Amino acid sequence: MQKKHIDFIFQTLDKLYPNADTELKFSNDFQLVLAVVMSAQTTDKQVNKVTENLFKIIKTPQDVLNLWLEKLTKSISSINYYKNKAKHIFWLSKMLDENPWLLCPDLEELQKLPWVWIKTAKVVSYVLFGSKVIAADTHVHRVSNRLWLVNTKTPEKTSQTLEKIVPDKYKQIAHHTLILFGRYLCIARNPKCESCPFTQICEYKKSL
Ligand code: SF4
């Protein structure tokens, strides 16, 4: 992978999305963990709709435990897999209430929490603690392949490869800018190539 190619991509993405950040709404670390857990197979917009009211009453793990599982399940019923997510949020809150130190930058510690797998752990560690990791969802996976940053079959492999090839100076922006680019420009079907700054280097566009 040419350094010039990587520099061009991330410098361009940085200009395109100078204030790139998570689109999930939260007001403390615990709420961010819950929002990320809820966002699996669900859009950030749907999660924000649910959390707009929920996070007025849930600010700590104890608040979740006080709410009861039935009420929590009902409150998040508009998102995918809400029954499972409610159960896991309940157990996650119980575990964090008893072991608050698990909410830390360490990926292994974070993964001890229910429903927190490697991708979720990386997002939490990156957003809350600025860790130099690059979580890959379907957007990051798709656009990284289209831009020829990686040549991978799975988001997990994309994440590992990006972490190896992307210099540390771009790791603070890589995850968020790639997501925004995939969400709004290089969308899965009908990417908006006419507005894209990468048409000259995009292998995918050339194959269309
Ligand atoms: S040219 Fe089109 S397919 Fe290629 S990166 Fe840009 S939007 Fe995506």
Image (cartoon, helix red, strand yellow):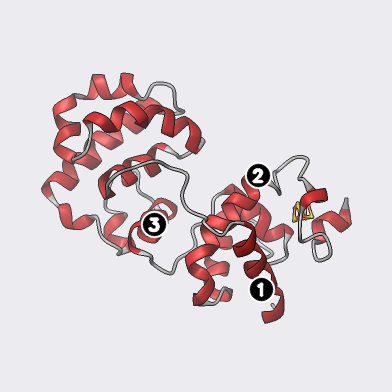
Q: Amino acid at mark 1?
A: Ile
Q: Label 1, label 2: how many angstroms apart (C-alpha)? A: 21 Å
Q: Residue at x 32, y 22 (%)?
A: 75
Mark 3 = which residue? 127
The amino acid type of the residue labelled 2 equals Tyr
- Please name the residue that numbered disc 2 is placed on: 184
**Percent coordinates x, y for residue 201 in the rendering:** 80, 66
Dot 2 lies on which element?
Answer: helix
Residue at disc 1, secondary structure: helix
Amino acid under disc 3: Val
Helix, strand or loop at mark 3: helix
Mark pair 3, 1: CA separation: 22 Å
Q: Nearer the viewer, residue 109 or 192?
A: 192
Return the disc, 1 or 2, that comes first in the chain's sequence: 1
Q: Is residue 168 left or right of residue 89?
A: right
- Direction from residue 186 to residue 82 in the image, left or right: left
Measure how far apart labels 2 and 3 are at the Cα level: 20 Å
Q: Residue 6: which disc?
A: 1
Ligand 1 closer than 8 Å to label 1 CB: no
Q: Position of residue 136 (x, y in %)?
A: 53, 55
Q: Seen from this angle, which residue lies furthest bottom?
A: 3
Q: Is residue 86 above or below residue 208?
A: above
Q: Is residue 42 visible?
A: no
Q: Position of residue 143 (x, y in %)?
A: 67, 55
CB under 8 Å between discs 1 and 2: no
State the count of labels: 3
* Mark 1 neighbour class, 10 Å CA radius: few under 14, some 14 to 19, many 20 or more: some
62 horizontally vs 54: left or right: left
Residue nearest the observer in this picture, 138 or 114: 138
Toward which corner of the image does residue 53 lie, by quadrant?
Answer: top left
